Image: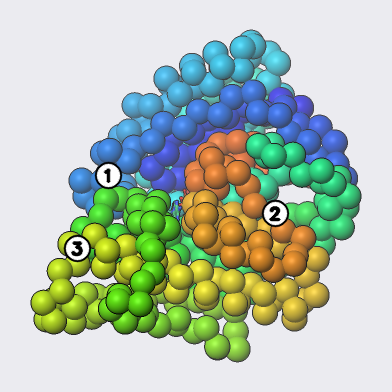
Amino acid sequence: MIILAIETSCDETAISIISANGGFRNPKFKILSNIVASQIKIHSKWGGVVPHLAKREHERNLPTVLKRALKKAGFQIPKIDLNAVTVGPGLEPALWMGINFAKELAKKWEKALIGINHMEGHILSFLLPQKTEISNFKFLISKLFPAIALLVSGGHTELVLMKDWLKYKIIGQTRDDAAGEAFDKAAKMLGLSYPGGPVVAKLANSYQPSPADNRIKLPRPMLNSKDYDFSFSGLKTAMLYLLKDLKKKGLAVDNGLLKTQLCAEFQQAVIDTLIAKTIRAVKEFKIKTVILGGGVAANKELRKQFRRHKLNFFIPTKNFCTDNAAMIACAAYFRAFKKEFAVPSKLKANGNLKLK
Ligand code: KG4
Ligand code: ZN
């Protein structure tokens, strides 16, 4: 099956064409093209994504991104079996751009159309081709469930229990900021650029601890709460007070070493909570597989520290952690098996779409 998918839920205009086979038992995907036009330069001035600018840029980018995706895949439209598009969650004006474009294409090319939940794309993105082949992938896939997916992106932090393919139950989520949002806000406080996650991570990873360093400790909110929820806004406030305190003591945060130390402590506070809650869920629900997805899953230290736990563990390669359309195509493959095709006129954007 050849699938063309469109993703415009936030600030990336993405189109991908993949070929898929193997069904639910042995799903295999080949990326024919995967184009992502980033709008970071436009939004970084504002320190976050501006919805009407995102909408304008998607409208501008979609025709060229489509041309590039078709050219890279190197074949003609008749070979495409199915069109897919993200319908939520995300910024509604941005989602609509992708949906309207997908509807027009499906009509013009006379193809079936499927609407996809962006978070389902993040969950299934681990199935997309890895740089390093997982040697016993087929065996591991056959022993996947029950699985738990930790979704960590700019808008979401969720622990999702999966008893089977496409069966989701959210057992925990953030009560305030998402993990990626927390990284972005911490970066802003430290005078770093948007998006904050990659910059904070880079500085954090360059930190070399020394006994002469100042004592810095940030809280791990809700680490010991009995549920599976998260909270990151307290961590952000704690960072703000810590910065004020350091300033009062005459310590300049512009000082490179102190900044790297703050980034390292912030990153570790986020990692500690994410890992602790996930591992607790693994024990309680007798989980066989842990899946990571979303932009924050690109975090090197998070990946490394998760891997220390002896688990059947899947994380997408970094380019499939952040927003892309290949993951939407991947989810569409499964939904096509269930014949969940859309009536194009009824396909709508839903900014708060939930996994179910
Ligand atoms: O999944 P994603 O690309 O978009 C959403 O669906 O939100 O996630 C973007 C988020 C941003 O908040 C960004 O700062 C964060 O992922 N992020 C990271 C890293 N790379 C991206 N956070 C921590 N470490 C990273 N290496
Ligand atoms: Zn995302």
What amino acid type is highlighted by mark number 1?
Answer: His
- Tell me the residue that label 3 is attached to: 255
Relative to 245, residue 32 above or below: above
User: In terms of secondary structure, where does tag 2 sit?
Assistant: strand
Disc nearest the viewer among 1 and 3: 3
Mark 2 crowd level (few <14, some 14–19, many ≥20, 10 Å Cα): many
**x and y, in percent, of residue 260 in the image:** 32, 62
Task: Name the residue: 55% across, 88% down.
Answer: 224
Relative to 110, residue 268 above or below: below
Identify the mark nearer the N-term, 2 or 3: 3
Mark 3 crowd level (few <14, some 14–19, many ≥20, 10 Å Cα): few
**x and y, in percent, of residue 97 in the image:** 42, 36
Q: Are marks 2 and 1 in contact (CB under 8 Å)?
A: no
Task: Name the residue: 59% across, 59% down.
Answer: 304
Disc assigned to residue 314: 2
- Tell me the residue that label 1 is attached to: 43
Q: CA distance from mark 2 to mark 1?
A: 31 Å
Q: Nearer the viewer, residue 145 or 314?
A: 314
Relative to 259, residue 71 above or below: above
Q: Nearer the viewer, residue 197 or 106?
A: 197
**Side of 356 where 58 appears, left or right:** left
What amino acid type is highlighted by mark number 3?
Answer: Asn
Disc nearest the viewer among 2 and 3: 3
**x and y, in percent, of residue 182 in the image:** 37, 66
User: In terms of secondary structure, where does tag 3 sit?
Assistant: loop
Identify the mark nearer the N-term, 2 or 1: 1
Task: Name the residue: 69% across, 68% down.
Answer: 309
